[in-house]
Image (cartoon, helix red, strand yellow):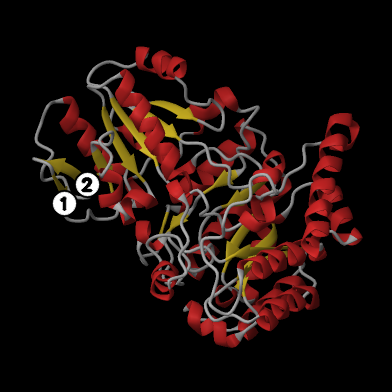
Amino acid sequence: MILINPRSTKFGIFEKYVPLSVPIGMGYLAGYLLGQNEKVEIIDEHITPISEKVLSEVFKLSSAPYVVGISTLTACASRSLEISGLVKKMYPEAKVILGGIHPTVLPNEVLGSNDVDFLVRSEGEEIIAELYEAIKNKGDYSNINGISFKQNGKVVHNPPARLPDLSKIPPFPYHLFERHIDKYNFGFMSSSRGCPYDCIFCSQRSISGQEFRYIPTQTVIDGITILLDKYQQTHINFVDDNFTVNKSRIKELCESMIKKRFYEKATFDCQTRADAVNDEVLVLLKKAGFRLINFGLETASERLMVILNKKETVQQNIDAVKLAKKHGFGVSGTFIFGLPTETRQERWSAYRLAKELDLDYVRFNNATPYPGTRLYEIAKEEGRLFIEKGWTNLNACASLVQDSSTEAKLPYVPVTCDEKTLRNDVIKANLFFSLRPNRVFRLLIKRIGPAGWFYLPPRWYLRPGEWFSLARLAFRLLASLVRVFI
């Protein structure tokens, strides 16, 4: 089976300094298929852009019936369909399967393309293996749960499939990505799936629901061991949505990490909620080698917290940040500007809160109504949903990472604001906070930034090219700041 990860340009002008993680979701799919004795080829467009030549070379390594699986996030939905069309043009007999958040929440739209044969909805390991087996053996796929397809000109949605038992999912197959180890940053891993909460902006619930499941502790420990000993990683970022939600599980994991003395070889980051940390959890994380925690702080307004359905308060966020700092952690936070009914005063109170808490790193995102979220429905109800062709403007970092030549319309602007003001506020808040000399100095010295989204190469200061690239980035950021004032 051929698995394709389409290219995303989410980080724009920052792309050079955002570490390229191995595609974790696709990697788990490949590992599961390998465990079923299937042959798998992977193309990651962040490494190898798709072309007729590339597809031809990969298809030569496969045998009929050709089956292509394409990972599809909303932001790259257009590119996924372009690739589907190219595959069908070159190999009309090939079967094209799309999976991921976008096909899960908008299956009818995606199956409107004549170049797509099947959709896999929700978590796909077991589903895609069953579907692939049916296609290979020309068997009956009509009763496979979790898929959508066209039959006699009509779209058929089979019932949802059960979520896979993570204890039966094979360990992540890092070896599949070894040939590009010079381009990937291997220091990312997942130890759980899901989150028991239902915030209005989070589309991940469409895939994993609100059921929290975690990978067995020994499997996680084995994965860390491989990353440290085989691939010499010195920093690992856990990409779990809510790392500490299950405190007994965190205790077991941290105690195992401490016993293995991983803290002597590497540091670790995670993201979690304010109400999921306490003294006991933070002491364990610190002993295990964790150095930074990212909190989704979102806003400084208790009123907006209720609208967000966070099920926590601003005060809980404040207390958690202070507690983490007390235990010696670096703390990064993310805020959202442009929430429903938000006032400009509430936006800037979030900026002031970030400064008062003396956060190490902060990112102020623009509210993005991804399909499958309550925010998406609110935007439609308000008549404020602005989607460009191919969903290309669905990017929570858009205001910050775009330059004047690539600027796209924001997908949502609340009724209490206009787009120019919102965009300018996002840019100002990010640059006012991050371009202060002490913050720039800290980032350059520590080299590894907030929870996996900024990374400078080792000994970067000895490379003239890096100085030039950083200077160019600084110039573009300052130009953006000047532009918003003009």
Depicted 309 relative to depicted 121: above or below: below
Answer few, some or many: residues within 10 Å of disc 1's Cα (few below 14, many 20 plus, some between 14 and 19): some
Answer few, some or many: residues within 10 Å of disc 2's Cα (few below 14, many 20 plus, some between 14 and 19): many
Residue 310's disc number: none
- Circle 1: residue type: Asn
Is disc 2 in contact with disc 1, using a CB cutoff of under 8 Å?
Answer: yes
**Residue 7 image position (x, y, % from top left):** 52, 37
What residue sits right under mark 2 in the picture?
A: 147
What residue sits right under mark 1 in the picture?
A: 158
**Residue 417 image position (x, y, % from top left):** 60, 75
Q: Nearer the viewer, residue 387 or 260?
A: 387
Q: Nearer the viewer, residue 277 or 351?
A: 351
- Circle 2: residue type: Ile
Helix, strand or loop under label 1 = loop
Position of 163 compared to 412: left or right? left
At x 48%, y 48%, the residue is 75
Depicted 486 relative to depicted 76: above or below: below
Residue 32 image-quadrant placement: top left
At x 16%, y 51%, the residue is 158
**Residue 261 image position (x, y, % from top left):** 66, 49
Labels 2 and 1: the sequence-earlier one: 2
Position of 337 compared to 464: left or right? left
